[in-house]
Image: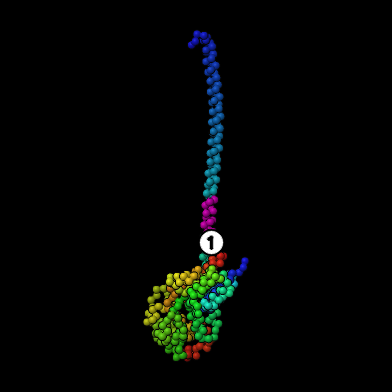
């Protein structure tokens, strides 16, 4: 079975390191980006099967990055999970409005992250 | 009685009729007896079958009860394994968080970056966006804010050691890790303080890490959070030491 590709977009090296450790238990190829701009560029270039997107980032935030990915036919259908520190309804709604499929709150729970990733990758 | 029929014939006919009737009656009786015997046999057979089926039913019920009990035991075992799996995964995740925190903290020799990493760990591992990293001034009389998030940096720029829980933490070297509902005297501004730990190097206090309001979806600090904070207290202190901080002030205390 082909290895699935996951793009991790976060400006926090701590979160990127944690996500990489959690997901390295699965058969995934992981790509990282440290802000929204880089995330959009890597998504278009690498065509990942799933994107984990932080919200607050320099240059382009998560909402803006998701909107751009949804506007492009190449990445329109790629599932995107937002990783957010803010669980307020307004913030969550903004994520769904921008086009994300799901969200996970920080601090990260390894089991929750792995379960959602597996669900979206159809495993 | 007819005149043409002699009496003997009549009697003979009646006799023959009675005889046939009796014979038929006996035959019918015999048939009915045989039928009754057959029915009796059938009844006996059916009763035997009914008993046998009742025995089989009882056996099947017992088997069903045994299977149900086994199934319940297996389900209970599954639930137990699931709970243990979640517990193990949580432990794994906690260990991974500690590992990442240590890798990040000791991955730099720049003081400002150590402070940034400490903040990053508090936000992303502990779950708070209101925090301050305070370093002890060389004269050891007050704490200076070296990095913060979500705080009024101006108001918290300097904290005298005589002031509040932060000052007490720096003076005593004792962490403030309150139990739920624990009531303690707080200085103005410390109303939302969730925890603070001393940053230490070889047992000497070099600063304080203070965590104020937690993220909305995090109701309270848990045992792992307290472990993480205690670990950060020593590891941030050591990481700061590796950067050349402090300038010897604590050695003069």
Q: Residue furthest right?
A: A1
Q: Is residue B231 visible?
A: no
Q: Give the camera-side residue of A96 and B124.
A: A96
Q: What residue is disc 1 on?
A: B78
Q: Give the camera-side residue of B117 and B41.
A: B117
Question: How many numbered tags mark residues here?
Answer: 1
Residue displayed at 53% across by 61% down: B78
Magenta highlight range: B63-75
Vertical relation: B86 (above or below) B210: above
Q: Is residue B58 left or right of residue B186?
A: right
Residue displayed at 40% across by 86% down: B162
Residue displayed at 53% across by 18% down: B18
Vertical relation: B216 (above or below) B205: above
Q: Is residue B239 visible?
A: yes
From the image, give the main secondary structure of the stretch colored magenta: helix
Q: Residue A107 at x, y = what percent?
A: 49, 74
Q: Residue B84 at x, y = what percent?
A: 53, 66
Q: Residue B63 at x, y = what percent?
A: 54, 50
Which chain is home to disc 1? B
Q: How is the image coloured?
A: rainbow
Residue B175: which quarter of the image? bottom left
Q: Is residue A64 magenta?
A: no
> Mark 1 packing: few (<14 Cα in 10 Å), some, or many (20+)?
few
């Amino acid at each position: 079975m082909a290895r699935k590709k996951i793009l991790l977009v976060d400006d926090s090296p701590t979160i990127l390191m944690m996500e990489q450790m959690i997901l390295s238990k699965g058969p995934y190829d992981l790509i990282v980006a440290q802000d929204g701009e880089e995330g959009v560029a890597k998504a278009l270039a690498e065509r990942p099967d799933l994107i984990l997107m932080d919200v607050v980032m320099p240059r382009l935030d998560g909402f803006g990055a998701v909107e751009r990915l949804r506007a492009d036919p190449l990445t329109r259908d790629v599932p995107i999970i937002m990783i957010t520190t803010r669980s307020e309804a307004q913030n969550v709604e903004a994520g769904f409005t921008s086009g994300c499929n799901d969200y996970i709150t920080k601090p990260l729970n390894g089991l929750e992250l792995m379960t959602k990733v597996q669900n979206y990758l159809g495993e | 009685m007819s005149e043409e029929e002699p009496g003997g014939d009549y009697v003979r006919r009646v006799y023959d009729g009675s005889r046939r009737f009796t014979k038929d009656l006996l035959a019918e009786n015999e048939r009915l007896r045989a039928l009754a015997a057959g029915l009796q046999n059938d009844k006996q057979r059916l009763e035997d079958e009914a008993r046998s089926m009742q025995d089989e039913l009882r056996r099947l019920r017992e088997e069903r009860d045994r299977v149900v009990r086994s199934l319940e035991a297996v389900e209970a075992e599954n639930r137990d394994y699931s709970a243990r799996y979640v517990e193990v995964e949580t432990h794994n995740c906690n260990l991974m968080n500690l590992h990442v925190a240590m890798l990040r903290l000791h991955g730099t020799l720049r003081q400002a970056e150590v402070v940034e990493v400490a903040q990053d760990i508090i936000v992303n591992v502990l779950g708070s966006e209101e925090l301050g990293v305070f370093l002890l001034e060389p004269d050891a009389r007050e704490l200076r804010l070296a990095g913060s998030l979500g705080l009024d940096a101006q108001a918290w720029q300097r904290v005298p050691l005589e002031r509040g829980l932060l000052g007490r933490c720096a003076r005593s070297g004792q962490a403030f890790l309150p139990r739920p509902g624990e009531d303690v005297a707080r200085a103005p501004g410390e109303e939302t303080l969730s925890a603070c730990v001393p940053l230490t190097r070889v047992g000497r206090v070099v600063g304080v890490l203070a965590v104020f309001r937690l993220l909305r979806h995090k109701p309270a600090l848990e045992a792992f959070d307290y472990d993480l904070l205690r670990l950060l207290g020593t590891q941030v202190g050591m990481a700061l030491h590796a950067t050349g901080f402090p300038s010897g002030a604590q050695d003069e205390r």
